[in-house]
């Protein structure tokens, strides 16, 4: 085996090890990491879908309970992909074993890929569970499987990267709960999960376009239902642009040891 092949083999082993650790981390405590999202989504469907939805009527030509499915699924993906990485990487900082990774021959992009893949795995796993719950209340079929899967995975990647950046700057366990509470929650609930922005006045429609979650929710809604308030090209451009930016920031922070090296 050549030197180059040996190097890539080491990188692959490192990545597999990190991913395996991350998957075991959330799968062993599935009652805390996966089940709550299923219960919460069930309550959303019962309250908003059945009780309130029947009074609201149709939204963009779809039953209200069908209309909110894409947003609720993506909301679970966003929350879990973010939470998994931010808690895991901060725990590695708190326990100081992340320093062993930084002094190892593994490059920063391999370490980043391992943590992000773990977040994506949890986000996708929870998203599939939530989708299964949704099927108990609706009978929708994907309009475009390719678009649905792409948005599903790309959104998990983006918010896993966001969780990593939050973990880098966090100095306490309280710091890792600030962004989900004061940033993610408002962006998600105001991102068109429960309504079409066509219902809003022109000023609020314009302000809504500054919310990146709106593009993800609408792209996912197009994949499932075939309707969207946002052009598909604009939605994917926004998602990919944020991913590239977050990858660049994450690698720079990791290479410089920000929040880790003292």
Image (cartoon, helix red, strand yellow):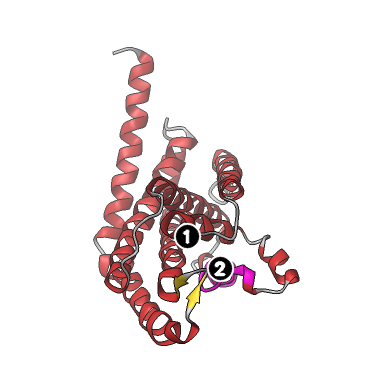
Vertical order, 211 against 137 (above or below)? above
Of badges 2 and 1, the one in the foreground is 1
Label 2 residue SS: loop
| N-term mark: 2 or 1 | 2
What x and y, as percent, mark residue 23?
30, 52
Q: Which quarter of the image is occupied by the N terminus?
A: top left
| Tag 2–tag 1 contact (CB < 8 Å) | yes
Cα separation, mark 2 vs mark 1, equals 10 Å
For label 2, count other residues whose C-alpha is less than 10 Å away and answer few (under 14), some (14-19) or many (20+): many
Vertical order, 99 against 13 (above or below)? below
Residue sitting nearer the eye, 48 or 21: 48
Residue sitting nearer the eye, 225 or 203: 225
Q: Is residue 51 left or right of residue 256?
A: left
Q: Which residue is mark 2?
A: 192
For label 1, count other residues whose C-alpha is less than 10 Å away and answer few (under 14), some (14-19) or many (20+): many
Q: Which residues are magenta?
A: 180-198
Give yes or no for residue 141 being in the magenta stretch: no
Q: Residue at x 33, y 31 (%)?
A: 12
Q: Residue at x 27, y 72 (%)?
A: 136
Q: Residue furthest left?
A: 28
């Amino acid at each position: 085996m050549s030197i180059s092949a040996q190097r890539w083999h080491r990188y692959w082993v490192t990545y597999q090890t990190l991913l395996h650790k991350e998957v075991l981390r959330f799968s062993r405590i599935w009652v805390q990491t996966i089940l709550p999202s299923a219960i919460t989504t069930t309550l959303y469907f019962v309250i908003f879908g059945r009780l309130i939805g029947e009074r609201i009527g149709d939204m963009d030509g779809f039953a209200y309970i069908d209309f909110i499915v894409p947003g609720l699924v993506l909301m679970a993906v966003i929350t879990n992909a973010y939470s998994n990485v931010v808690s895991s990487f901060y725990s590695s900082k708190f326990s100081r074993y992340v320093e062993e990774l930084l002094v190892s021959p593994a490059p920063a992009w391999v370490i980043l890929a391992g943590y992000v893949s773990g977040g994506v795995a949890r986000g996708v796993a929870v998203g599939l569970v939530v989708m299964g719950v949704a099927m108990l209340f609706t009978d929708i079929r994907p309009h475009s499987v390719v678009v649905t899967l792409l948005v599903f995975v790309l959104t998990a990647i983006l918010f896993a990267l966001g969780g990593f950046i939050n973990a880098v700057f966090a100095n306490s366990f309280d710091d890792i709960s600030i962004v989900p509470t004061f940033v993610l929650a408002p962006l998600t609930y105001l991102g068109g999960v429960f309504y079409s922005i066509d219902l809003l006045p022109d000023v609020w429609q314009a302000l809504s376009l500054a919310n990146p979650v709106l593009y993800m929710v609408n792209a996912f809604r197009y994949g499932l239902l075939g309707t969207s308030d946002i052009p598909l090209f604009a939605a994917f451009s926004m998602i990919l642009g944020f991913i590239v930016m977050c990858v660049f920031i994450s690698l720079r922070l990791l290479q410089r040891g920000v929040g880790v090296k003292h």
